[in-house]
Image (cartoon, grey):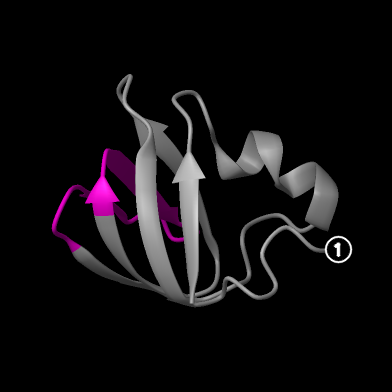
C-alpha cells in the first residue's frame, strides 16, 4: 500500500507521462481518497471525480489530475509499487 499526495496543478499526463513514456497510466489503482479531489479520465472519455471518503477502482488506461487548490491525498492498494517507473 502507498500514500500519495498530489499537489494542486498536478496532472499525470504532464508530470508522469514523460517519465513512463506511455500515452496514459497503465497501472490499475484501488484507492481511498483522504483529502482533496482527483478527476480520473479514462481513454474512452469517461470521467469521474473522487473526493474525501470515496473509494475508487481505476483500471489501466487513464489520465488523472487534482481538482481545485487543495492537495489530494490517496491511499492506494494497487498500482503504487510501479508508480512513475519507466
Residue 35 falls inside the magenta stretch: yes
Residue at image mark 1: 86
Left or right of 21? Residue 27 is left
In depth, the one of 75 and 14 nearer the eye is: 75
Task: Report helix, strand or loop for mark 1.
Answer: loop
Q: Is residue 53 above or below residue 6?
A: below
Asked if residue 21 can be seen in this view, the reply is no
In depth, the one of 20 and 44 nearer the eye is: 20
Specify the quadrant of the image occupied by residue 65.
top left
Where does the C terminus fall, quadrant-wise?
bottom right
- Where does the image place residue 82, in percent across and percent down from the top left? 70, 73
- Where does the image place residue 85, in percent across and percent down from the top left? 80, 63
Q: Farthest residue toward the left? A: 53
Residue at 54% across / 73% down in the picture?
A: 60
Q: Is residue 6 above or below residue 63?
A: above
Left or right of 83? Residue 20 is right
Q: Is residue 59 above or below residue 47?
A: below
In depth, the one of 2 and 25 nearer the eye is: 2
Residue at 70% across / 46% down in the picture?
A: 16
- Where does the image place residue 19, in percent across and percent down from the top left? 83, 49
Residue at 55% across / 66% down in the picture?
A: 61
What residue range appears in magenta?
34-54
Residue at 27% across / 56% down in the picture?
A: 33
Residue 11 falls inside the magenta stretch: no
Q: Is residue 73 above or below residue 86?
A: above
Give the number of marks: 1
- Where does the image place residue 21, in percent across and percent down from the top left? 83, 54
Within-10-Å neighbours for mark 1: few <14, some 14–19, many 20+: few
Amino acid at each position: 500500500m502507498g500514500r500519495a499526495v498530489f499537489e494542486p496543478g498536478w496532472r499525470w499526463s504532464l508530470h508522469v507521462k514523460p517519465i513512463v513514456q506511455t500515452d496514459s497510466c497503465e497501472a490499475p489503482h484501488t484507492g481511498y481518497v483522504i483529502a482533496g479531489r482527483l478527476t480520473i479520465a479514462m481513454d474512452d472519455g469517461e470521467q469521474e471525480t473522487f473526493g474525501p471518503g470515496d473509494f475508487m477502482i481505476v483500471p489501466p488506461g487513464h489520465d488523472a489530475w487534482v481538482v481545485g487548490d487543495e492537495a489530494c491525498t490517496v491511499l492506494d492498494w494497487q498500482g503504487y509499487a510501479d508508480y512513475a517507473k519507466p
